[in-house]
Image: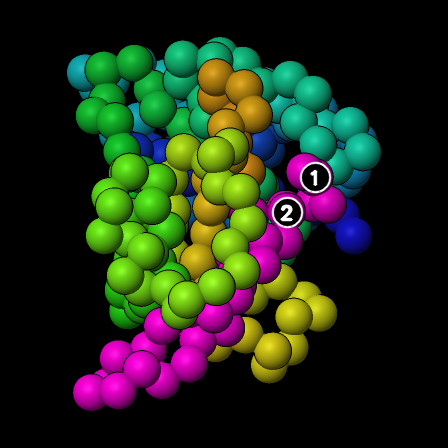
């Protein structure tokens, strides 16, 4: 499956990709099909004259990022559904993503992963005794996951994303899927968590 490139910016402006005018780049971002082996050049011309224009270069090899420059102003995330999210942060712009994921309830799984990665000892209170939990030591953060990866079907009750840093400006979001059981008084506890790496990476 070929990747889809989703380009967003922390500041609105006009976007050009490989020399082609693509219109304004605002909060919702823009999506483009990409080949597994491709050279992509994205230029952003911010509407704010105090923010410098930016040109970012990305090279894909077999669907993975082989090069992404400039490292201080271009950041990429691999998502489990084959989307590569590219955020442009021009010099002088405020850091932070303009894109807003669809609202997600802070479910038991996302709360557990956030607490566990922060080293909160109370995280285990969200697990059933003898729950099956994978090693999470390689992950930096937990995020909402808009879509479950293909093939997981109805076997799981909740989903969340686990962020693993790859390089200084690239990371991947692996899918964490949990099985929950009722624990009385409207509460549910986790009995099992399985992790599905993005793009088949470990």
Q: Residue at x 46, y 52 (%)?
A: 161
> Which circle marks residue 87 in the picture?
none
User: Looking at the image, which is closer to me, 107 or 123?
Assistant: 123
**Where's residue 139, x and y in %?**
46, 36
Task: Find out whether the residues at labels 1 and 2 contact each other: C-beta distance under 8 Å.
Answer: yes
**Where's residue 159, x and y in %?**
47, 64
Stretch of the chain drawn in magenta: 173-202
Q: Residue at x 28, y 38 (%)?
A: 118
Q: Is residue 65 left or right of residue 48?
A: right
Which secondary structure type mostly characterizes the magenta part of the structure?
strand
Between marks 1 and 2, how big is the CA–CA gap? 5 Å
Can residue 186 be found in the magenta stretch?
yes
**Mark 1 closeness class: few <14, some 14–19, many ≥20 residues within 10 Å:** few
**Where's residue 124, x and y in %?**
32, 56
Q: Residue at x 49, y 41 (%)?
A: 136
Q: Residue at x 29, y 53 (%)?
A: 123
* Occupied quadrant, residue 103: bottom left
User: Looking at the image, which is closer to me, 40 or 175?
Assistant: 175
> Which circle marks residue 201 in the picture?
1
> Which circle marks residue 197 in the picture?
2
Tell me the element at label 2: loop
Q: Is residue 149 left or right of residue 93?
A: right
* Occupied quadrant, residue 180: bottom left
Can residue 32 be seen from the camera position used here?
no
């Amino acid at each position: 499956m070929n990747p889809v490139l989703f380009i967003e910016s922390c500041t609105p402006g006009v976007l050009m990709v490989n020399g082609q005018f693509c219109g304004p780049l605002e909060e919702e971002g823009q999506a483009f099909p990409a080949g597994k082996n491709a050279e992509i050049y994205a230029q952003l011309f911010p509407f704010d004259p105090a923010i410098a224009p930016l040109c970012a270069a990305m090279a894909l090899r077999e669907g993975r990022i082989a090069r992404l420059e400039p490292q201080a102003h271009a950041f990429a995330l691999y998502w489990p559904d084959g989307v590569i999210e590219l955020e442009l942060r021009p010099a002088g712009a405020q850091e932070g993503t303009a894109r807003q994921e669809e609202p997600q309830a802070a479910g038991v799984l996302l709360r557990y992963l956030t607490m566990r990665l922060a080293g909160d000892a109370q995280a285990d209170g969200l697990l059933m005794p003898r729950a099956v939990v994978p090693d999470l030591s390689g992950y930096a953060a937990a995020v909402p996951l808009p879509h479950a990866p293909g093939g997981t079907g109805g076997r799981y009750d909740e989903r969340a994303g686990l962020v693993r840093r790859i390089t200084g400006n690239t990371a991947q979001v692996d899918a964490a899927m949990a099985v929950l059981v009722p624990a009385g008084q409207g509460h549910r506890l986790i009995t099992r968590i399985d992790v599905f790496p993005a793009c088949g990476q470990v």
